[in-house]
Amino acid sequence: MPHQSPISDNVAHDVLRTVFGFESFRQDQETIIRQVLNGKDVFAVMPTGGGKSLCYQLPALLMEGTAIVISPLISLMKDQVDAAVENGIAAVFMNSSLDQREISDVYRRLKEQQVKLLYIAPERFAMPQFTEMLKGIPLSLFAIDEAHCISEWGHDFRPDYLALSAIPALFPGIPIAAFTATATHKVQQDIISKIGLRTPHSVRASFNRPNLFYQVEPKSQVEQQLLKFLKDREGEAGIIYRTTRDAVNETAEFLDSSGIKALPYHAGLSVEVRERNQEAFNKDEVSVIVATIAFGMGIDKSNVRFVVHADLPRHIEGYYQETGRAGRDGEPAHCLLFFSRGDIPKIRYFIDKMEDEGERRIALEKLNQTVRFASHNVCRRKQLLSFFGEAYPAANCEACDICTGSADRIDISTDARIFMSAMARTNERFGIVHIIDVVMGADTKRVRELGHHEIKTFGAGRLHDKNHWHFIVDELLAQELIKQDGDRYPVLKLTPRGAGVLTGPGEVFGLKREAVKIKVRRRNTVEGGRYDEALFERLRAVRKKIAGENHVPPYVIFSDKTLHEMCVHFPKTASEMRMISGVGDVKLKRYGGEFLKEILSYREKAT
C-alpha cells in the first residue's frame, strides 16, 4: 500500500464543500471516511439514500492510487460514473458493455494513474488476468457495494461475490469498505466473515427513512386502483412492482392506454429494450416504470416520488430495499402496497417447490413476516425497523397509514370466541380458509366429508362476509391469541392466552380501520422556507435540456432538493449559487450561469 500522508479534518471538509457542494456530513459519513483514510476496514449498513457513495468517493480523492468499486449491475455503473464525472472526479467503469478498444483505453489510463475511481462487476474481479493487472498499479481502497450479495442468508445471494473473499490475501495492505442497505445482524456477521474483513469498524445507521410515507391498501381491482393513485401524480417519477412478467406487460399497456407514460422492465425483455426503457425513465422521458424485482438494484434515480407494490413481496428485505428507491434526494415520497390474501398461495406455490427443507422453512417465515407487516394494525415504520433490530421510539411516526388514519376500537369478543371455538371443535388441525368456511356455514364437499357441518359453531358467523372473518383472524394472530403452525400446510393453533380467552371472561378488542383516502403527500417547503413551484418547473426544464446535451439523466445535473433550495433563496450571483446544497465548484462553473439566468428572467417577469 502506498504511503499515505496524514489528512486533516479541514481537508476532508474542504473537499466535501468544493467537490460535492455540501456544507456538512450526514450522520456516520465522517466516521466512515476517517476510518478508511486511516487504512482500516469498514462495514456499514446504510439505508438507500443515506449517502454511502460519498463514503468511498471522498477518501478516494484524498488517497494515493485508484479506488476499486465493486457493484453488481452494469446498468447502475454508468449512472454512478456519470454522477462522479459531473462532480469533476476521474471515474471510469470496465464491464461487458465496452468493446476491446474501450477496455484497452481504461487499462492505459489506469497504468498512467489517471483514474481515481474504477467501477467493476464482481465477475471481472474473479478474472486472474485482471487481478494481476491490479497488482501492478497503486490502489487506495476497495469499496464493495450491495455487500449482502455475498451472504447466502441475504435476500439476493450471488455466487460471483464469493470471489471477493480473495481481496485481503491478494491485497493485504489495502483497506476494504463494504456497504449494504439491508442486512440483519445475522447477515452482517456472515458478510464480515465471508469477505474476511480485518477487525472492521462497523456502522449500523438507522434504517428509518423519515421522508417515506408507508401505506397498505386492500387490493381489489388493482389496475383501477393504480390509475386512481397516479392521477394525482402527473409528471412525477415512480416505480410499480409486479410479481410476474405478464403482469408487468399488462399493467404497462393499461397505464399507457390510459394516458400515463409507462414502460415495462423485466428479464424477459432483450438487453437493448431494458436499457432503452431504463434510460427513458432516468431521463424523465417517461414517468412510470412497471417492473419485476429485476429492476431492484439497477436504479440510482434520486427523484423517484413513489414506489407501488401491486403484489405481495416475498420478504421484508426486498420490500425495504425496493421502497428505498423512493425519495433518495431526501424529499417526501410515497410507498404503497396493495395487499390481498389471494397473493399468498401464488408465492406458496414457488416455496413448496423448493427441495431443501431448510430453505423452504426460511422462505415461508419470510413470507409470513411480510403478511404480518401488511395485515397488522401496528405502525408500519415500527414494524419495519423492528425487523432490522431497531426500536422506533415515538408512539406515532406521523408518516404511515396506521399513524395518520382513523380507527375505531371495537369489541370483537363474540366473533373471536366463535372462531376459536371452531378451531377447538375441529381439533386445531385446519388452516384459515377451512375454519372461515365452517363459521360461515359454507356447504362445501370437504366440510361435509369431515362432518364439520354438525359442530355447534357451524354457520355461527354467517351474517358476516369473508373480509370480516379475515379481519378477525388478523387481529387474533396479531394479539397472539392464535398462531400458525407447520410449514407447507400451516394449521391454526390456540395459544395459552387464546385458550384462556375462549373459556374465560376476558374481552377482545380490534382496530377497525376506515379506508384511508389515497392522497398526494407533497411538501412545497424545504429547509429555509416555502419554495416557488412555478420556478421549480422552469428550472426542471433547464435541467432536462442540459442533461440532454450532456447525455446524462437530469438528476445527475442537480437533484430536486437542490432545485427546491434555488426556488427558496433565488440566488442572484455565482457566490450565492455556490451556497446552495449540492452545487460544487465544477457544477457551478459548468451550469451555474444557465440556472442564474433562468432565475433572473423569472424574477423580472414576476415584478
Image (spheres, rainbow, N blue to C red):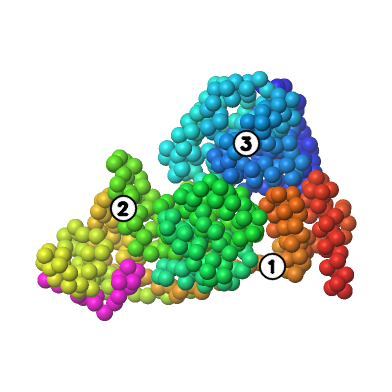
Q: Which residue is mark 3?
A: 98
Note whether 490 is above or below 40 in the view shown. Answer: below
Classed neighbour count for the residue bearing mark 3: other residues with Cα under 10 Å, few (<14), some (14–19), many (≥20):
few
- Select label 2 or label 1 by which is in front: 2
The range drawn in magenta is 454-472
Q: Is residue 248 magenta?
A: no
Position of the C terminus by quadrant: bottom right
Note whether 373 is above or below 519 in the view shown. Answer: above
First in sequence, mark 2 or 3: give its number: 3
Number of numbered tags placed on the structure image: 3
Q: Amino acid at mark 1?
A: Asn
Q: Nearer the viewer, residue 324 or 412?
A: 324
- Label 2, secondary structure: give it: helix
First in sequence, mark 3 or 1: give its number: 3
Q: Nearer the viewer, residue 249 or 595?
A: 249
Q: Amino acid at mark 2?
A: Tyr
- Select label 3 or label 1 by which is in front: 3
Note whether 116 is above or below 21 in the view shown. Answer: above
Q: Which residue is mark 2?
A: 349
Using residue 197 as the reference point, say whether residue 572 is left or right of it: right
Any part of residue 596 in sight: yes
Note whether 24 is above or below 438 in the view shown. Answer: above
Q: Which residue is mark 1?
A: 524
Q: Nearer the viewer, residue 449 or 257?
A: 257
Q: Amino acid at mark 3?
A: Leu
Residue plotted at (73% across, 66% down): 537
Measured as percent of width and height from the top left, residue 210 is found at: 59, 58
Residue plotted at (86% across, 64% down): 600
Using residue 206 as the reference point, say whether residue 357 is left or right of it: left
Q: Is residue 460 magenta?
A: yes
Task: Measure the alpha-carbon separation of dots 3 and 1.
Answer: 42 Å
Looking at the image, do the residues carrying marks 3 and 1 touch, with CB atoms under 8 Å apart? no
